[in-house]
Image: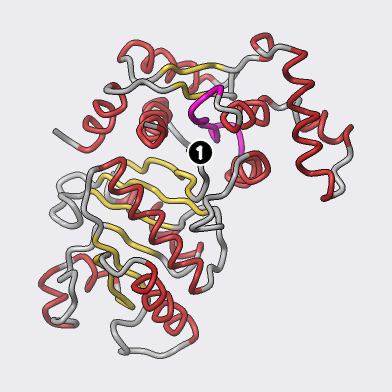
């Protein structure tokens, strides 16, 4: 059974309510039909006529009270809530839904900003980040072609602590959604001192921090990507690596490399890229690429549902 099929099956085992606020997006409507037909989740299409005006007014007041110290004007908040994505996020915050998925018609910045404003950060991480589940066909690397790439969507230039927290969040997602034992590689242009630079130092410090934070985690770095995922190369470049060229989670040093990397793999290797899955909150949500297909939306709903189980 391939990764995508497994994800859909796991979502069906314990149905969760996932809100889709992009109610007039054609791909979302097509995805909704698939979700309902396959019984993947209790998907709620959040058209304006499905929002109770009194409940919306209450959410606006609650949001305003949450952010009053940040100089949000109440009229500006009312304007923000004309977009159903804010009401969807508040539904998740209040436990009226288990997660939300958007991004076919919103930028990643829009979706992430909504999550940051409406949901609570996990105190262990205290940062929002993102990852992609990559499913590469006919691939022996990673977990039979399955990888997690992070962060590819939110933090432009993460510092060492942020990189460490990104890796912990990605490991948690790998266990929860994919039932994988995480094998994490911090990527760099250097493999264990083969080159020098501030970026290399940052990655090296991130490795030290994550080993202090979760000593049992199988993690290594700094590593070039071939040493991270190709056992034969690992034996040449870094024979003492604990992951032995079998990484299934790749942590990129910055957003440039992460975003470029996932899109190259997606297009050239014809891989499925699920996400960006937003991490770091106490409730799950997912962004989408604006180039997503209906099946991409279905699978992000499935992943978000599993994370809520």
Task: Name the image quarter holding the N terminus.
Answer: top left
Residue bearing mark 1: 283
Q: Is residue 261 left or right of residue 280?
A: left
Q: List x then y, in percent, for residue 139.
A: 16, 51
Q: Is residue 157 magenta?
A: no
Report x, y in % for residue 68: 84, 44
Q: Residue at point 39% right, 59% down? A: 168
Please tell me how crowded label 1 is: few (under 14), some (14-19), or many (20+) other residues with Cα within 10 Å: many
Please tell me which residue lies in front, 89 or 248. 89
- Magenta residues, start to end: 96-107
- The residue at the point 48 percent across, 28 percent down is 98
User: In which quadrant of the rendered image does the C terminus lie?
Assistant: top left
117, 261: nearer the viewer? 117
Image height check: is 12 above or below 220?
A: above
Quadrant in the rendering for residue 94: top right
Q: Is residue 238 rendered to the left or right of residue 294?
A: left
Q: Position of residue 163 (x, y in %)?
A: 46, 67
Relative side of 84 to 291, left or right? right
State the residue in front, 296 or 180. Answer: 180
**At x 22% / y 49%, what residue is drawn?**
180
Task: Examine the residues drawn in magenta and state their main secondary structure.
Answer: loop
Residue depicted at 23% across the width and 48% down the height: 146
């Amino acid at each position: 059974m391939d990764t995508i099929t497994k994800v859909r099956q796991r979502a069906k085992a314990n149905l969760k309510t996932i809100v889709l606020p992009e109610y007039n997006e054609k791909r979302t409507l097509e995805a909704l039909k698939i979700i309902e037909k396959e019984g993947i989740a209790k998907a709620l299409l959040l058209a304006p006529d499905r929002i109770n005006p009194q409940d919306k007014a209450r959410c606006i007041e609650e949001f305003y009270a949450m952010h009053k110290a940040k100089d949000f004007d109440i009229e500006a908040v009312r304007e923000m809530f004309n977009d159903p994505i804010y009401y969807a996020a508040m539904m998740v915050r209040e436990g009226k839904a288990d997660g939300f998925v958007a991004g076919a018609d919103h930028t990643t910045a829009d979706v992430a900003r909504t999550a940051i404003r409406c949901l609570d950060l996990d105190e262990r991480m205290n940062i929002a980040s993102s990852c992609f589940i990559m499913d590469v066909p006919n691939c022996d690397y990673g977990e039979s072609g399955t990888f997690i790439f992070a962060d590819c969507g939110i933090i432009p230039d993460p510092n060492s602590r942020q990189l460490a927290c990104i890796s912990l969040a990605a490991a948690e997602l790998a266990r929860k959604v994919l039932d994988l034992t995480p094998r994490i590689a911090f990527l760099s242009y250097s493999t264990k001192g083969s080159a020098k630079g501030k970026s290399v130092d940052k990655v090296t410090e991130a490795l030290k921090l994550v080993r202090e934070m979760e000593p049992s985690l199988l993690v290594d770095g700094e590593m070039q990507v071939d040493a991270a995922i190709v056992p034969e190369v690992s034996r040449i470049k870094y024979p003492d690596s604990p992951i032995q060229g079998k990484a299934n989670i790749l942590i990129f040093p910055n957003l440039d490399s992460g975003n470029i990397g996932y899109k190259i793999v997606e297009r050239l290797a014809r891989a499925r890229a699920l996400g960006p899955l937003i991490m770091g909150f106490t409730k799950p949500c997912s962004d989408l690429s604006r180039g997503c297909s209906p099946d991409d939306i279905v699978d992000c709903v499935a992943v978000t549902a599993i994370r809520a189980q």
